[in-house]
Image (spheres, rainbow, N blue to C red):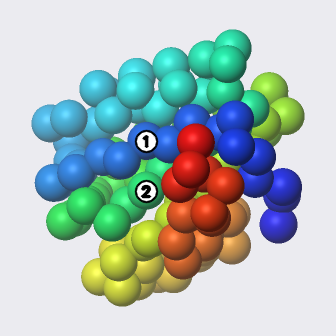
Amino acid sequence: MQSLSARMAIFQPSGFLNASNASQFQVELTSRIQAADASGLVVDMSQVESLDSASLISLVSALKLARQLSKPFCLCSVPPSLRIVFELTQLDRAFEMIDELPSPLLAA
């Protein structure tokens, strides 16, 4: 597990992530990863109700960008209904997933 610092940005999408909003989702992820003041990105998935292949592609693209920039990228609070999607696609092996936001990030 990569070190999560207090300078990591936190992004909390909500609702349904699908083809109709996947491009905006990817724009949000990209801008937050590229932000100069953020050492990485934690995506809090606790408010996401569903996601489809287009939103998974957005997450994979964001993960690739974070790796290119040598910035940590992880998902947290992934509900069981979404975690199964990651497991079925074997993306649970690619993404770092944590159960909840670490205390230093909550205080930030």
Q: Position of residue 46 (x, y in %)?
A: 33, 66
User: Would you place residue 18 above or below residue 89 in this image?
Assistant: above
Instruction: Please name the residue shown 65% across and 39% down the image.
Output: 8
User: Would you place residue 60 above or below residue 35 in this image?
Assistant: below
Write down the residue under mark 1: 11
Q: Position of residue 25 (x, y in %)?
A: 33, 34
Write down the residue under mark 2: 44
Q: Position of residue 106 (x, y in %)?
A: 53, 54
Count of numbered marks: 2
Distance of label 1 from label 2 (alpha carbons): 6 Å
Instruction: Please name the residue shown 47% across and 32% down the image.
Output: 29
Callout 1 secondary element: strand
Contact? badges 1 and 2 (CB < 8 Å) = yes
| Label placed on residue 98 | none
Instruction: Please name the residue shown 22% across and 51% down the image.
Output: 14
Which residue type does callout 2 highlight? Answer: Asp
Instruction: Please name the residue shown 29% across and 26% down the image.
Output: 24
Q: Is residue 76 visible?
A: yes
- Position of 63 with respect to 101 (left or right) is right
Circle 2 packing at 10 Å, graded few (<14), some (14-19), many (20+), is: many
Q: Residue 58's quadrant in the figure?
A: top left
Which residue type does callout 1 highlight? Answer: Phe
Circle 1 packing at 10 Å, graded few (<14), some (14-19), many (20+), is: some
